[in-house]
Image (spheres, helix red, strand yellow):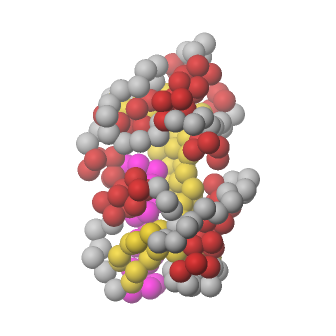
Amino acid sequence: MIKIILATSNPHKLEEIKAINTNPEIVFDVVKENFNPDENGSTFKENALIKAKEAAKITKTYCLADDSGLCVDVLEGLPGIHSARYAKTQREKINKLLNELKMVPYDYRGAHFICSMVLVDNEGNPVHYEEGRIYGYIDDTPKGANGFGYDPVFFVPEYNKTIAQLPEEIKNNISHRANALKPMLEWIKENLL
């Protein structure tokens, strides 16, 4: 059995990761102390590594961090690494995004969520990296009550719904975080258990 600390203060991430993880030998917890690293990297991967190293410094154990966000093609990848800080509240973030896209036809609203995930050892040395993505479009109006962040406006063509309209079990199977975490869990199982 191995316990891995998640380098996050986001309760949604912890819930999502626990739901995706089906291996009872891999147990996740969060940093219990004040955890507020300065995410000043220029990429998702750099920010994930900053968080993982900071958590390892505090906990002295294996730590997993991810940095994720929404990249809209016509906005040249924005909000990108600034997704969480694009505006203050979830509603304001979505409104700002939709306002930026109000003159853009639907066919040109391609976007993807990206998740960069880094595992570090107890000294903060990176031991494994995975990246997951999901592709879709930005819808005109928010739909659905599940999920968080930009999920209500991220339309997934294969399901003809926004992520926020999908049941948790489907979201946790196709999301960018799931697409990074599943191979990460396999690597942990093969190399650390």
Please report the bounds of the magenta region as a residue range: 174-193
Horizontal side of residue 130 vs 75, given as left or right: left
144 lies above or below 175: above
Q: Position of residue 117 (x, y in %)?
A: 54, 63
Q: Can residue 128 be spotted in the picture?
A: no
Q: Position of residue 9 (x, y in %)?
A: 49, 60
- Would you say residue 47 sits in the magenta stretch? no
Q: Residue at x 26, y 50 (%)?
A: 169
The residue most toward the top is 103
- Would you say residue 179 sits in the magenta stretch? yes
73 lies above or below 82: above
Q: Can residue 69 be spotted in the picture?
A: yes
Nearest the eye: 65 or 35: 35
Name the image quarter holding the N terminus: bottom left
Horizontal side of residue 129 vs 3, given as left or right: right
Horizontal side of residue 160 vs 32, given as left or right: left
- In the rendered picture of this protein, how many numbered marks are placed on residues? 0
Q: Residue at x 39, y 83 (%)?
A: 2
Nearest the eye: 33 or 168: 33
Q: Residue at x 39, y 72 (%)?
A: 28
Name the image quarter holding the C terminus: bottom left
The residue most toward the front is 34
Horizontal side of residue 124 vs 156, given as left or right: right
Q: Position of residue 76 (x, y in %)?
A: 69, 34
Q: Residue at x 48, y 30 (%)?
A: 91
Q: Quadrant of residue 158?
A: top left
